[in-house]
Image: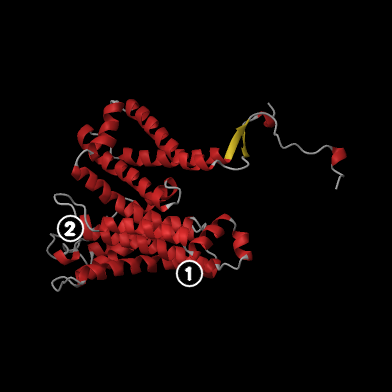
Amino acid sequence: MSFDAWPRLEPRGEPSPAMVWLTPVIAVAATVVSGMILFTLLGFDPVATLQAYFITPVSTRYGLAELALKATPLTLCAIGLATGFRANIWNIGAEGQLTIGAICGGGVALAAWGHEGPWLLPVMMVAGVLGGMGWAAIPAWLRVRFNASEILTSLMLVYVASLLLDYLMHGPWRDPEGFNFPQSRQFGPDALLPIIVSETRLHLGSPLALVAVFSGWLLLARSFVGFQIRVIGLTPLAAGYAGFNQRRLVWITLMIGGGLSGLAGVIEVAGPIGQLTPSISPGYGFTAIIVAFLGRLHPVGILAAALLVALSYIGGEAAQISLRLPLAVTGVFQGMLLFFLLASDVLIRYRVRLGASSHRRPAPAAQGIR
């Protein structure tokens, strides 16, 4: 059989703008259908399982508050990542920047333990942002100075941050009255975010995510820096001819991503956790990559995608309790969502062709024509 008869991908002339925004919906629908098949193979009623996964968790005020609570760190991290992704600067280390932000903000709370005041929470926020930015500055400097891949350096720093947190929890920052458990002291009242909805865990950090969405939109759509980011992402050569400083944008985008991820880390330890523990995040920094692309790297789309992915978190926990469904199904859902999103992206940019290529070489007689 000739290789010309095999299926192949040919670039489309211009991707449909409508399909660019419809593909996330298609990816979600395909994930739901695949989930139903998966539940059936596992021996569960697919309709009841989907109801327990997607509807029951948000049927109460407490459930809606938990949804917003889970979406907050995802939104913050994804907004920061999307800023860099738009400029083809691939920060994969939001998880590590979140961890360092939590360490820096939590360290301020522990240092002020017993001497707290209204000033403490703002200082913790600033420390967390600066910590995340400082951690992101390492891959930024390596990229600008040595042209090192920020993908590898930012990713490797995630594990360094995790080991640093583990050392602090088993060593100098361990609670002396905590019966030898690897965790810090409980933060004092002035180090905790105020609750904004009674009888829930929803705190003041969630409105900060909305501020980040609005600020991200202003930056990308209404500022000259945002214009530079978009141009470099779309046509790097044109950006070079225009005199845009690409090294400067490497610093700007990585600082934004690191700062927002660090802020997400402080919000976690000053909000639902209330102390430092060896495990602060269930993988928000990595999941934020899915959120950023599912939201089409647009701040408003990212907010909607964060709510959807947050629902997968709390839905997985609810299904585990009510139906004894394995918690690993949450990771399977998120993986399928990313797979179908990437597959849909391929099909809006390429078409599948069967048979001989439509781009044939010119006839010998025509090759001499100038």
Q: Is residue 92 visible?
A: no
Circle 1 SS class: helix
**Tag 1: residue type?**
Trp
The residue under label 1 is 141
Q: Nearer the viewer, residue 75 or 176?
A: 75
- Most distant residue in the bottom direction: 115
**Label 1 vs label 2: CA separation?**
37 Å
Q: Using residue 261 as the reference point, say whether residue 60 is left or right of it.
A: left
253 vs 3: above or below: below
Compare marks 1 and 2 and give the one earlier in the sequence. Answer: 1
Q: Report the colour scheme.
A: secondary structure
Picture coordinates of residue 25, whole percent (x, y): 42, 38
The N terminus appears in which quarter of the rendering? top right
Circle 2 SS class: loop
Could you classify mark 1 by the number of other residues whose Cα lies within 10 Å: few (under 14), some (14-19), or many (20 or more)? Answer: some
Asked which quadrant contains residue 244, the reply is bottom right
Q: Is residue 198 visible?
A: yes
Q: Using residue 329 as the reference point, say whether residue 62 is left or right of it.
A: left
